[in-house]
Image (cartoon, rainbow, N blue to C red):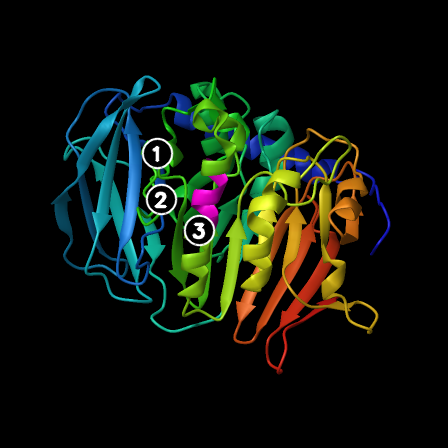
């Protein structure tokens, strides 16, 4: 799969049906019988210990109290605990609860509110205490035309993998950082998935406005609090360990660095990343950030990420690097990691994808400049990605709206050296 490919968009029946469902959901969330106190944008965020704890955030239109009620999904007694009101942003009030002392690999039901006005009941399952197999979803930029253009692909992903444990979002969730209507569209596109699975969210350049991070970002996506401790990074850099995988999210928006201090912005993260990867007890590592290591579209360059981060990622043999920003699809790795067997490489795999309908013309120029090779490159193709982790094997598929697999590979760690095989 090493040629530029433009599959036809023939799945209009599926798109229409999915779009109708998304619009209905959005209308229900926007109005209906809700009161200003009714929680919205309920979101599960990872913690440093997702097997025994869970962070939940939500928004209300007016200032209210904050509590969470939870208990075993199978029934029985529930516990109501106070939560925190984290502040006001974007015309709403935000709340956060962290449930602790949970049992690993256990499904809980919960609802959030002020004790009188509640969200609907939802369920989540804590991570297993051991490295059990699981699946996750990875989305590139949603950003534009969310309801009509991006939402059908998002909902197709959740329909195809209903038991996904995590969703990774590689930035530019919306186009305008302070547009609450766009954030409402993004949440409507996700449906109930924000309240039922953990979301690893990476900040993109469109989550900044005039070099300021979106006022709602850390209220909705607070991270785990274990980043480099740099105030300028606004807690957008952190990691979590989930069933044998260390997920690391970086902030590649060096354009937003204070006074354009790109060096400190990138070096602080590089030093922190080196520590996090040096002290990694997990078999697998996934790093995600927005601006790609190798620009995948015309006029794009990854020279700055390459300068500061490439050596760290290569030295620690990160398995997957999940990116967005370039509005085309590209997957590859350094030429130095190629073997003498056709379709087989080693070393980190770098992926760029786009979920929304905004497209750029793909290009291999910056890949070549960075001494890397594109193994698959697609233009004009909206995708979601399904990643499976099972012992010594990590599988990857990029799929279109109708489920067509347009790229696939497997990483095998069962031998003396890691092997990446095209499928």
Q: Mark 3 sits on what residue?
A: 271
Q: Which of marks 3 and 1 is in front?
A: 3
The answer to which quarter of the image holds residue 294 is: top right
Magenta-drawn segment: 265-271
Residue 293 visible in the current orientation = yes
Q: Residue at x 72, y 55 (%)?
A: 332
The image shows residue 360 at horizontal and vertical percentages of: 75, 31
Gap in angstroms between the C-alphas marked 3 and 1: 23 Å
State the mark number for residue 218.
1
The prevailing secondary structure element of the residues shown in magenta is helix
Crowding at mark 1 (Cα within 10 Å: few <14, some 14-19, many 20+): some
The image shows residue 178 at horizontal and vertical percentages of: 44, 19
Q: Mark 2 sits on what residue?
A: 223
Crowding at mark 3 (Cα within 10 Å: few <14, some 14-19, many 20+): some
SS of the residue under disc 1:
helix
Mark 2 and 1 residues: CB-CB less than 8 Å, in contact? yes
Q: Which residue occupies the extreme right position in the image? A: 3
Left-right relation of 384 to 255:
right
Q: Nearer the viewer, mark 3 or mark 2?
A: 3
SS of the residue under disc 2:
loop
The image shows residue 110 at horizontal and vertical percentages of: 26, 48
Picture layout, residue 333 above or below residue 175: below
Residue 156 visible in the current orientation = no
């Amino acid at each position: 799969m090493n040629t530029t490919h433009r599959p036809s968009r023939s799945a209009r029946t599926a798109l229409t049906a999915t779009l109708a469902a998304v619009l209905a959901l959005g209308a229900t969330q926007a109005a209906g019988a809700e009161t200003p106190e009714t929680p919205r944008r309920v979101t599960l965020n990872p913690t440093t210990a997702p097997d025994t704890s869970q962070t939940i955030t939500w928004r209300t239109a007016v200032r209210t109290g904050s509590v969470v009620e939870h208990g075993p999904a199978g029934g029985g007694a529930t516990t109501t605990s106070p939560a925190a009101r984290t502040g006001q942003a974007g015309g709403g009030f935000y709340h956060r609860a962290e449930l602790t002392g949970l049992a690993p690999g256990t499904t809980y039901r919960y609802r959030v509110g002020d004790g009188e006005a509640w969200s609907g009941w939802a369920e989540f399952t804590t991570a297993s205490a051991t490295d059990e197999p699981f699946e996750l979803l990875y989305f590139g930029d949603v950003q534009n035309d969310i309801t009509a253009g991006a939402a059908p692909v998002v909902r197709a992903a959740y329909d195809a993998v209903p038991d996904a444990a995590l969703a990774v979002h590689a930035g530019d969730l919306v186009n305008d950082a302070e547009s609450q209507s766009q954030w409402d569209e993004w949440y409507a596109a996700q449906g109930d998935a924000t309240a039922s699975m953990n979301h690893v969210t990476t900040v993109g350049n469109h989550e900044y406005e005039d070099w300021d991070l979106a006022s709602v970002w850390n209220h909705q996506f607070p991270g785990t609090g274990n980043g480099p401790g740099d105030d300028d990074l606004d807690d957008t850099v952190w990691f979590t360990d989930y069933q044998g995988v260390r997920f690391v999210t970086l902030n590649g928006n060096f354009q937003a660095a204070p006074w354009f201090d790109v060096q400190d912005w990138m070096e602080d993260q590089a030093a922190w990343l080196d520590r996090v990867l040096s002290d990694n007890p997990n078999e697998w590592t996934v790093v995600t950030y927005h601006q790609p290591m190798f620009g995948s579209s015309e006029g794009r360059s990854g020279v700055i990420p390459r300068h500061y981060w490439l050596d760290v990622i290569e030295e620690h043999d990160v398995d997957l690097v999940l990116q967005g920003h370039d509005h085309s699809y590209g997957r590859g790795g350094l030429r130095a990691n190629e073997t003498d067997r056709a379709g087989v490489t080693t070393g980190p795999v770098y992926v760029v994808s786009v979920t929304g309908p905004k497209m750029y013309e793909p290009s291999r120029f910056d890949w070549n400049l960075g001494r890397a090779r594109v193994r698959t490159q697609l233009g004009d193709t909206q995708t979601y990605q399904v990643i499976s982790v099972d012992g010594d094997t990590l599988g990857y598929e990029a799929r279109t709206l109708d489920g067509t697999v347009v790229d696939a590979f497997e990483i095998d760690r069962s031998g003396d050296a890691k092997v990446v095989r095209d499928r």
